[in-house]
Amino acid sequence: MKLAILSESPADEAALRVLAEAVVDGPVEFLNPGFRARGWPSVAQVLPAVLRHLHFNTDADGVLVEVDADDSVVHTEQHERPDYFHPQCRICKLRAVVRQTVKKLPTADGRHRLLRAVGVAVPAIEAWYLCGRDETVTEAAWLEGQRTGRAPYSRAELKWRVYGTDRPTLDYEITCALREVARHRRDPRRLLNDFPGFGYLAADLRSWKPPTTES
Amino acid sequence: MIASIQFRHFKALRATGLQLQPFNLIIGPNGSGKSSLIQAILRFRNLAQLPLSSEPPGAGAACTGPELVFKFIPPFDGVEAHLCGVSESRCDQLNVSSSPPGAWDELRSKLMDVRVYLFDHYAMAMPSPRSGDAELITNGGNLAAVLAARRESNPDAYAAIESEAVRLMPEFSRIELRDAGNGKVELAMVLREDGDVIPADGLSQGNLYLLGLLVLGYDPAPPAIVCIEDLDRGIHPRMLRQARDLLYRLSYPDAFSLHREAVQVIATTHSPYLLDQFRDHPEEVVIAHKRGRAATFERLIDRPDLNELLQEGSLGEMWYAGILGGVPDEEIDIRPGKVRIEP
């Protein structure tokens, strides 16, 4: 499997590479260098161009997209209903962008379609890093905070808990990210359970079949 | 070190003020006072070397022109410096109130150590005279000599620079400093792939600037204040995070487990990509607004709608769009006769 990653930072991409291999339980080839967006909504803006580029100019099987949820509406089971779309949900939005883009793409080099895996870290990827080591950090806790208007933690607090500083260097961020996702690589079940935003991404990846081609 | 500066009739800064943080990123159009802020600090540094004026602040004809008032963070919060003059070119009267009286002497010795940089890659690539003085000059023109001196005087600090350099520029395996004759030393870098040596004039602008930032960031005895003009210049947008990290190393030593005083950094930029790096720390961003010939400063953190804005997109996009201000005036003339329509 050959994957392209569209993420917000090199640290995110490092973690996503490890997590993707954990989910498919095998080696994955990654397009290098990865695609980078400047946060939301740049991810959604640049995604159609990334998809077209991948489709016509590369042999990647698909693209993995991950963004932070920040304070947006969290994707829930309700959003998974057929034809459901929540305009403030980033997974709904990104899936719609992919759907609208790829349906217009003609077959290229025998490739019918490009696969996609979309995940949203609630509220930020540092929450995934803390999963399994800080019991208070879960997607359910964040949802409950949104419901009651009392956030259990802020993005800044999550960063502090992971990095021990609010100004980590990029190199240190990558070191910490790899240290934390090593736990999930051994056993991703806790992350799948506590963070459905990762679960949707994993389900996408696991649903991939070898790409259909025609000569 | 500097807590705030009040400006009156100083170049475009007619009537404005600025609270300074340990790290400050100044954004704004050309002529909006970014460089004037740095010039004000330099003017203050230069005057601080001279005996203080015996005239009371603002006395007589000596102070009919620009005025600057500097205040400081503890332990110098009992010091206030008042700088004024008759014209922009003659802003040369400095009065200081100091409590306790000895605080000014201590502060003055720190002010001697203000450094301003506007890197010039042509100068940085030149061989430079060896010197025991390990201080980078304004255009970075003695980069090779500083690295050589650092290697001699502080091998650990030099090793840290080299290690970080090859991490940031992975095509290279090491820095090479070669004797260039006539007491000069020249810089080169060795390619990882085949060991070829690339002389400094064959290195890219961005690589030389990153080396300059590394020398600053890993200075074992940094100055009190560092000002950098056009921090983003020549550096790829994907490397700007690392450039920021190098300067954070100066401003927030605790975050790097360094046991020394924080260096106050003032950097200017025109890069939306660099601005993006400050999403988590909007308190460090200063927007320079220009209206006509007058300029004012505004801290991004003071915007009441900042949290809502941060949900909508990147800081860089919002700055470019004009939502944050700090963009050039545009005159679009639609008077009849201004547009000629061909029949």
Image: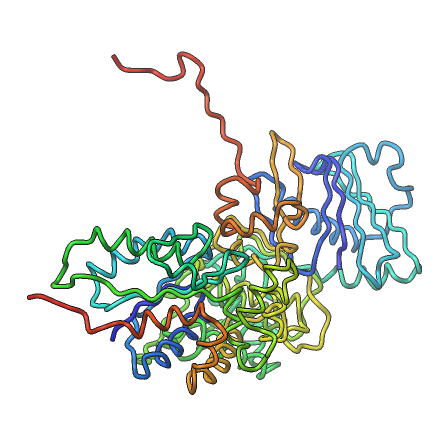
- Is A33 drawn above or below residue B31 in the view shown? below
Task: Residue at the far left: name it.
Answer: A215
Tell me where residue B106 sits by quadrant. Answer: bottom right
Task: Residue at the far bottom: name it.
Answer: A186
In the picture, measured across the screen, residue A74 lies left or right of residue B82, that is: left
Q: Which sits in the foreground, A61 or B93?
A: A61
In the picture, measured across the screen, residue B152 lies left or right of residue A24, that is: right
Q: How many marks?
A: 0
Residue at (19%, 58%) from the top-left corner? A56
Residue at (47%, 77%) from the top-left corner? A191
Residue at (56%, 67%) from the top-left corner? B245
- Give the x, y percent position of residue A48: 31, 53
- Give the x, y percent position of residue B76: 84, 60
Tell me where residue B173 sits by quadrant. Answer: bottom left
Q: Which sits in the foreground, B154 or A14?
A: A14
- Give the x, y percent position of residue B292: 60, 29
Kindly tell me whether residue B178 is visible in this rendering: no
- Give the x, y percent position of residue B189: 41, 74
Kindly tell me whether residue A105 is visible in this rendering: yes
Q: Which sits in the foreground, A93 or B220?
A: A93
Q: Quadrant of the C terminus of chain A?
A: bottom left
Q: Quadrant of the N terminus of chain A?
A: bottom left
Color encoding of the figure: rainbow
Residue at (14%, 59%) from the top-left corner? A108
